[in-house]
Each structure stands twice: as C-alpha cells, then as structure tokens.
Image (cartoon, rainbow, N blue to C red):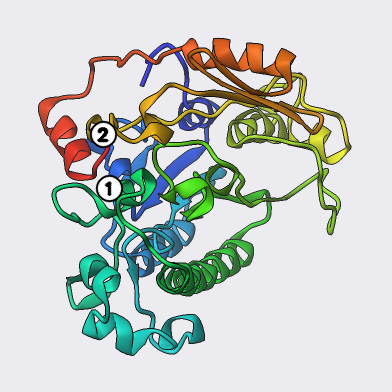
Amino acid sequence: MRRDLPTLAERFDGAGYRTVSVATNKLLDPDMGLVRGFEAASVEASDADTVRVADAALAVDDERPLLLFVNLASAHAPYNLVEGVPFSDAHKERVLSGDGEILSALRVELDGEVGVDPSQECGGLRCDLQHSAGTLIIDDADMQVLRDLYDANLVLVDNALKALIAAWTSERGGVVVVTADHGEAFGEHGVVQHRLVTVPATVRVPLVAVGPGFEAGTRCKTSVMVGDIYPTLLGLAGIDEAAWDLLDAAAGTPRPERIEAAAWPFPDTAHVPLVSQRWGYVAQDGRWGAASGERRLGDPALAEEAASVGAESAEGSGMLGGAGLERLRALGYL
C-alpha cells in the first residue's frame, strides 16, 4: 500500500488508542502489509479461533480506548457443509458422494471438511471461468447447491458476530460497524463467486452502524461505499472532522462524489469476453452507464464518464516481497 496515505489504524494509534486486528483471512497476515499501524495483528485458522482471540483482546486490562478490527471468512469459497443447518443438510448426500459431473468437479475435502469450490480446475481452466466463458454449464439445480451452502456458511458468520458483539457490549460501549468486502455471485451475468467483474451481486453488501448519532432502526437509502467508514470513525472518535460521512448519509444527504469499484482480470481470462476488456461503470440517481473500448451502454453522458473510469489503471507499489507475491499467487490473486 502507498505509505503516504495513513491507515485507519495509524490514525487511531496516533490518537492514543490500542489497536488490534484479528482475522481469518490470510491476506491480513502482518507480512502482507495490509494491517499497517495495528499494535497487535494476527491471522487465525478459523472464525472460531478468531472470535476467541478477539474476546481475549477485549478482556485485556488497558485504560486506553480500543480500535478492534475483526475479519471473518466462513462465507467464502470453498462453501463447506455445515452440520445441522437445513440449507446444508438438504444437499449433504449429493456433496459427499460428488453426485453428478459438476458437483464431482467442484467437490473439495480439506482438514476433514467437505464442500464445493468453483475455483477448482475443469479441464485446464478454473470452473468458474469456464462458466463465464460459456464452455461449462452449471445448471439451476447445481447452482442452488452452491447458493445454499454459501447461505449455510453465513449462519456461521452470524453466530460469530453474535458472540463478538455480546463480548464487546459486555466490556464497553462505543461504536460497532459491520460490513463486508464483497458480495458473491451465483450465475448473475454469467459470474460465479466475486472476482473479475463489478456487478451488483458482488459490490452491494450489508453495512450496519451503531453508535452516537445513529438513530436505531433507521434504514438508509443513500448510496455509500466501504471507504466511507474511514472518515466516519475518525469523526466519531473526535480525531478528524469529515466533510461528509455515514452520519450525513443516514440523514439523507447525498454522497458528494461518485462511488467507484474495480476488479482485475486473471491472466488466463483473455478469451472470456465478459472479463477480457477493461469496463468502466458509474451510477447516479438511478441512471447508469458502462463503457469498454468503443462500446457504450446505458445513459450516454454517464457512459462517457465510465469510459474515463475504465481507462484508469492502478500501479503496484513494488514494496511487497517475494514471499508475499507467492502468497498472492497461491490465493489466486496473481
């Protein structure tokens, strides 16, 4: 990450907070650089372990206020069978036996857990990419298995959140924000999982905020983005004053700037039309525009703006070491 931009943890650390990150996602290993500024940061083997470590952090006798970041990963491929959850139990026999061509190809077994993973290889190319290219058909019945197992794993996340929030509120008051880094697609626009493209299924995620200034039960219709959490927390903590934040959104004040999202294609997707070109997409007041090369879709004026968005590129910082790059390759990001 760019070192000239302060992270949320660095800002809170500078204001005298104790800063702790506990995650199940290996991308948040301290060696990867994404948890810069946290006084303590760890990656655990499971969400259950993450909750236990977070609970321990809450129980530490420290008079400083606390910024606690917790990342849970159960609702992520592979979508494992979850005992006792109806969404999962309905497909248990089919998944265990690898019934049918698709489930047989997607079936995975790791550390005693059995599930399905669209990232599995199907004839030299990942199954989800084959589906996007139209060379592998995942029919409605098999897609329902993927969707139901994902929902079953959401139950695990819900239970973990319940335990975390109970531990937080028993130890202190303050602010709680719950959100996600991405959604998951199950066939929408030919996409499976969350990579490659920015379609509504992958960029529309829950965002719940509890704290001073937020009226209980308020459902906000103003479009926001995950990055808006940054100025909101700084403002609520009295560290910095934002020109616009989630409190403004809750009051119905429109976001002054456009919302942007980006996805990077994999090297082996050149033949998949959906993801082989750089597309730009913008939406405003119910209108939308998308552009790729000479093609324009949606509102003409917004499509022209989308073309400029699609032309932008992100340059790597070059600061990640060889081990970090290998880890990204192993996770499928390079």
Dots 2, 1 in contact, CB < 8 A: yes
Can you say which quadrant of the picture contains the C terminus? top left
User: Dot 1, how many residues are within 10 Å of its Cα: few (below 14), some (14-19), or many (20+)?
Assistant: some
Q: In the figure, is residue 31 to the left or right of 131? A: left
Q: Amino acid at mark 2?
A: Met
Q: In the figure, is residue 186 to the left or right of 169? A: left
For label 1, the SS is helix
Residue that badge 1 annotates: 26
Q: Can residue 68 be seen from the camera position used here?
A: no
**Of label 2 and label 1, which has the lower sequence position?**
1
Residue that badge 2 annotates: 32
Can you say which quadrant of the picture contains the N terminus? top left
Q: Which residue is the extreme one toward the front?
A: 135
The x and y percentages for residue 311 are 48, 11
Q: Is residue 209 above or below residue 246?
A: below
Quadrant of the rendered image containing residue 111: bottom left
Q: Who's the residue at 28% across and 29% down the image?
A: 270
